[in-house]
Image (cartoon, grey):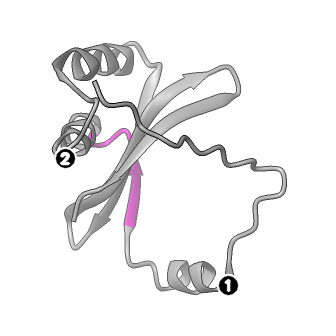
Amino acid sequence: MVLADPRAVVPLDNFHVPHALRRLLRRKPFEITIDKAFSAVIHACAERESTWINRDIIDSYTRLHELGHAHSVEAWKENKLAGGLYGVAVGGAFLANQCFIA
């Protein structure tokens, strides 16, 4: 099994959106959805040369999603899945893994 390293923590209390990102987001190049394509996101994230996401992980996260504990955020460009993240909500935290698809 390959573990993701390093892990990132994004503290939201002082989060700053850089000017270039703000400009990009104003152009709205992506449609963002939540829980629209959970299965597609986790499978796309698993389709890498080196990954820890195996069948057991996919099945476990899918079950958590069915129970309302795991969620996905999808980025769509021209009606095609371009990227996303999936993760588990625990208390006030959302522990997520992301990937770029297109």
The foreground one among 32 and 51 is 51
Residue 59 drawn above or below residue 21: above
Q: Which residue is mark 2?
A: 48
Left or right: 69 as drawn, with respect to 40:
right
> Residue 20 placed where, x, y %?
60, 86
Q: Is residue 75 magenta?
A: no
Residue topped by disc 1:
19
Look at the image and say whether residue 32 sits in the magenta stretch. yes
Question: Which x, y percent locates residue 56?
Answer: 22, 14
Tell me if residue 13 comes above or below residue 15 in the rendering: above
- Left or right position of 55 against 75: left
Q: Quadrant of the C terminus?
A: bottom left
Q: Secondary structure at mark 1?
A: helix
Measured from the top left, where is residue 37 in percent x and y?
26, 42
- Magenta residues? 31-37
Name the amino acid, label 2. Arg
Residue drawn where x is 56% and y is 25% of the image: 89
Q: Amino acid at mark 1?
A: His
Query: Judging from the image, what secondary structure is the residue with disc 2 in?
Result: loop
**Residue drawn where x is 67% and y is 49% of the image:** 10
Q: Residue 81: give x, y in percent of width and height.
A: 23, 58
Alpha carbon separation for disc pair 1 and 2? 31 Å
Which image quarter: residue 101? bottom left
Left or right: 65 as drawn, with respect to 9: left
Give neighbour class at mark 2: few <14, some 14-19, many 20+ (Cα, 10 Å): few
For residue 74, above or below residue 9 = below
Residue at x 59%, y 45% (from the top left corner): 8
**Residue drawn at 41 percent across, 59 percent down:** 32
Question: Foreground residue, 79 or 61?
Answer: 61
Q: Quadrant of the N terminus?
A: top left
